[in-house]
Every structure is written in structure tokens, then in C-alpha cells.
Image (spheres, helix red, strand yellow):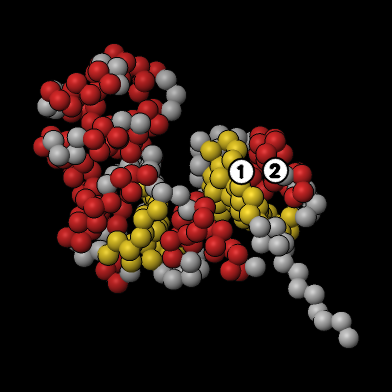
Amino acid sequence: MLGLLYFRPVILIADSGSTKTDWVLVSDQGEEERFQSMGLNPFFVKSETVSEALSEELPKSALNATSDIWFYGAGCSSDARNAIISEGLSKVLPGARPWVAHDLIGAARALFHNDPGIACILGTGSNTSFYDGTDIVKNVPALGYVLGDDGSGAHLGKELVRSYLYGELSQEVVNTIEGDYGLDKETIFRRVYNENLANRFLASLAPICKQHLEDDSVHHLVSHAFDVFVERLLKKYSDYKQYPVGIIGSIGLAFEELIRNKMADEGFQLSRTMKKPIDALVKYHRELS
């Protein structure tokens, strides 16, 4: 008598931002193949762009073997925008089942798997949500870098150049801004007001804050940014002290100790930080398959 054969589906997992997308293909033998493509934010790309980006990088062995696609992406916050992604994926992998969700769900699953907690993204921008172990059940609105993104790289960069232009920084920090980064008032104004992607430009200045964190003028603006982050993006969740907080993103890692102390002062427990969620998402979906 023949034993039952166990079939493990081939799955494709993606974590996408506006700049790049991390992909991991998990074969039916459990082997992993990783690749990257351009960022696939449906605010900025069409379904044809999604198809082109995936087809250029996707291993040919996956074309007829992939069963499920799990795509977590920035901008995937409505049915209409999610459809842009799923339609693009289906053109390349017509036999696969695409599942598209916001990157906050990806962050929550990466940080907590099936346990509840407050999931945060703290990189170029910022966002938070309360995750019940299955889904996002509450989210403080993300307002973008002009009105919001509190505690993000863009926020830190904005406060840094404001302090620079108002003459509030020490000469050592000014030397870094002008000498190492080649910036002055006119260049800053052009990059912020006349060129695209001002948020990325501002976030690119956050390393100056890390470099000069012991400088009183810089420490003050960084400390205040994280005070605002805690006040506006974390304390909005009721009974927040009962749940762990996790952070994904480069800013969360770079300023982990300061953020942890700020949270502890308000009764939060920072349980985990990670730069990118893709490895933890692979683990999460491998356990499901």
C-alpha cells in the first residue's frame, strides 16, 4: 500500500517599499531563493510595472510552480490599490493565488506572529497599529512627512535642517552639514521645495543625528521627536501598557536605546526591533505551509 504523498506548495513572499522590494521564493523542498526588484507602491506604479518588475527577476523555475503569493507593501491600503498589485502579479504567475496587504500587517506578523502587540514602522516614514494576533484592528492615521511621520527619518532630517537654518546647532554639527554633506540654505530649499522625493532627502540626513547624538543641540531635537512619536502614535491605543511594542525600520535600530527609554518612561515595553521584516515573514509563512 502506497503512503500518502505530502505536497508542500511553492510560495513567493514579498516585502515592498517605495524604493525596493525584497522577494523570497520558497520551493517545495523548502529551499529559499532571494531577489530584489524596484519598489512597487501602488500610489506610484501601474499593474504593468508590477508585471515587468517581477518577470525581470523571477526565477524561471517558479513560473508554473508557484501556488501562493504573499505580498506586503507600502501603499496597499485599499481594495483598488491592492488590485493594481494583484493584477500585475497574476499576469506573470496566472496559476498562483495572490494575497496583497499593507506593510503594517507584514510588520505585525514579522514582529509578533500570532500574538497581539503594537507594531511600528520607523524608517523614512512612521506608522503604528494594534495587532490582535490575526489582523490590524486599530491604526493611528499616517499623515505623511509634511503633516506626520513623527519620529521618522524624514522627521529627524526636517528638524535638523530647521535648526541649522535657524542657527541653533553647534559649529561641529554645522561643519558636518556643510562640509560632509555639501549643504547650504539654497541647496536645502531646492531639494525640499523644487525636487521630487523630499522625504527621502530629509531622511538621508538622519545619520547626522546619530553621529552627533551626544551634542546637546542634536540630542534635544531627537529626544523631542521621539517624545512626539510616543505621544501621538502610541498612546492613542487603549490599555497599551498590556501589550509589547515592536519596531521595524532603520531609525528604530539606530536609536533603539533612546526610544526604549522614552517608551519605558510612559509604561511601554519595547520587545523587539528589526531592520527589515522579510526573514521573519518567511519564517511565519513556512510555519503555515
Looking at the picture, does residue 261 appear above or below residue 250?
Answer: below
- Quarter of image, res 138: bottom left
Q: Residues within 10 Å of mark 2 (few under 14, many from 20)?
A: many
Q: Residue lying furthest right in this view?
A: 1
Q: Residue at x 42, y 20 (%)?
A: 195
Place of residue 16 in the rendered image (x, y in percent of width and height, measured from the top left): 54, 45
Q: Nearer the viewer, residue 64 or 135?
A: 64
Disc on the earlier residue, 1 or 2: 1
Q: Which residue is mark 1?
A: 35
Above or below residue 216? Residue 106 is below
Residue at 59%, 40% (x, y): give it: 36
**Disc 2 target residue:** 58
> Depth check: 88 or 34 in front?
34
Q: Does any portion of residue 40 appear in the rendered image?
A: no
Give SS at disc 2: loop
Dot 1: element: strand
For the N terminus, which image quadrant? bottom right
Residue beneath the point at 35% across and 16% down: 190
Residue 40 in percent (x, y) is at 58, 39
Q: Outermost residue toward the bottom?
A: 1
Q: Amino acid at mark 1?
A: Phe
Q: Is residue 197 left or right of residue 178?
A: right
Note whether 147 is above or below 27 in the view shown.
above
Say whether marks 1 and 2 touch (CB < 8 Å): yes
> In the rendered image, which quarter contains the C terminus?
bottom right
Q: Is residue 182 above or below residue 103?
A: above
| Image position, residue 224 (x, y; %) | 18, 44
The residue type indicated by label 2 comes to: Leu
Does any portion of residue 243 appear in the rendered image?
yes
Query: Residue visible at 50% across and 68% down?
Result: 134
